[in-house]
Image (spheres, rainbow, N blue to C red):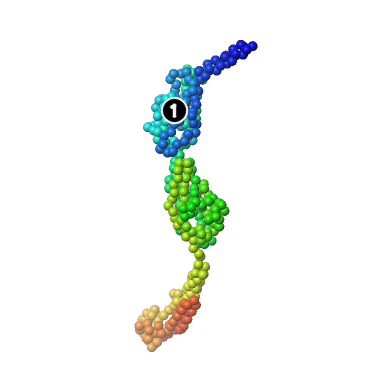
Amino acid sequence: MAKTRLACLLTLLSTHCYFSVLAVVLRTSNDSPWTDEFDRIELSCLIESISTSNPRIEWKKITSEGPSYVYFDKKISGDLENRATIREPATLLITNATRSDTAKYRCEVTAADDQKSFDEIVIDLVVRVKPVVPKCSVPKSVPFGKSAELSCVEEEGFPKSQYQWFKNREEIPDDPKTSLKFFNSSYTLSAETGTLKFIAVRKEDAGEYFCRAKNDAGYAECAPQQMEVYDIDVVGIALGVLVVVVVLLCITVGICCAYKQGYFSSQKQTGNNYKVPAKGDGVDYVRTEDEVGGSGDGSGAAAASRCNPVCVCVCVCVCVCAQGDFRHKSSFVI
């Protein structure tokens, strides 16, 4: 019985070894490697077993647009050309990684002489990119008790940047209630969007603010910017509004007075625009003394029509206008 069991065990081991030798098997030392931009990175593709002496080795880059060759027919191609080499037997070494290299890579080995002639492994590469200096927006001055929003944006870093805000070189906590210095402040802070919103600013919120964008590759900061908090001059605003109202009232009253006195009428006739009718054949006209006086230099018309507007605007607008009656006198003798 013992000999039978031993024979079965030896048979199973030999069969397993036989199929292992006739099958290509791949493995990797790291299926999720990462590196910083411009550094080197190795995508390991190790052949554990193979019987074919000269297998076909291929590397493909898999993106949303589909797979593309980076190593084919024993040549580096695509965007890794001149930036990568193959380390025997099938490991891909990228010597100068860039952000565009972040993708999935597939190592494929085909062994024609093996019973299991094909195997593949997929490696997920991440190239980390340090953030650049973020764009920060800080209001220069905010009225006391009003809301205010500070923004911080950085779009170059990978993975996506997280944000921190600082006031007077001290980090602002996400929750103001966790710090004695910010306990009385009312704000919301988003580390994902980089937005710092004050619900109602206080005098104590005035200071120098700057933002830091950070990820696994490093961090960058914008230049500090000063934010002032000032009181609203309610009395000054009220006086200003009152002055504007008084000025508008004066203008309105003046215009109404001018209309009533006929200054904007185009039908008004004066002594200067009086014209002597043309003489007919055999007709003589005799002008009266009043007409002779009115047709001279216009003094008669000026005397006939008198208007003395007086507008005084000291919080009150008064318009006095005395208008004389204009009477056109004319006579003729046939």
Q: Residue at x 47, y 47 (%)?
A: 213
Q: Secondary structure at mark 1?
A: strand
In this view, the residue in front, 40 or 24, is: 40
User: In this view of the protein, which residue sits in the foreground, 267 or 59?
Assistant: 59
Answer above or below: position of 230 versus 297.
above
- In depth, the one of 326 and 248 nearer the eye is 248
Residue drawn at 49 percent across, 28 percent down: 28
Query: What is the quadrant of the C terminus in the image?
Result: bottom left
The answer to whether residue 51 is above or below residue 65 is above
Camera-side residue of 319 and 152: 152
* Pointer 1 residue: 91
Question: Residue 260: in sight, yes or no?
Answer: no
- Bin the neighbour count of mark 1 within 10 Å (Cα to Cα): few under 14, some 14-19, many 20 and up: some
Relative height, residue 150 to residue 239 (above, below): above
Which x, y percent locates residue 137?
46, 53
Q: In the figure, residue 91 lies in which quadrant?
A: top left
How many marks overall? 1
Q: Position of residue 219 (x, y in %)?
A: 45, 45
Which quarter of the rendered picture does the N terminus lie within? top right
Q: x, y percentage for residue 294?
A: 38, 84
Q: Residue furthest right?
A: 1
Q: Where is residue 251 shown, x and y percent of the image?
A: 47, 73
Q: Residue flagged by tag 1: what amino acid is it?
A: Thr
Residue plotted at (53% across, 17% down): 17
**Which residue sits furthest bottom?**
289
Residue under the image location 39 percent in, 27 percent down: 75
Residue 132 visible: yes
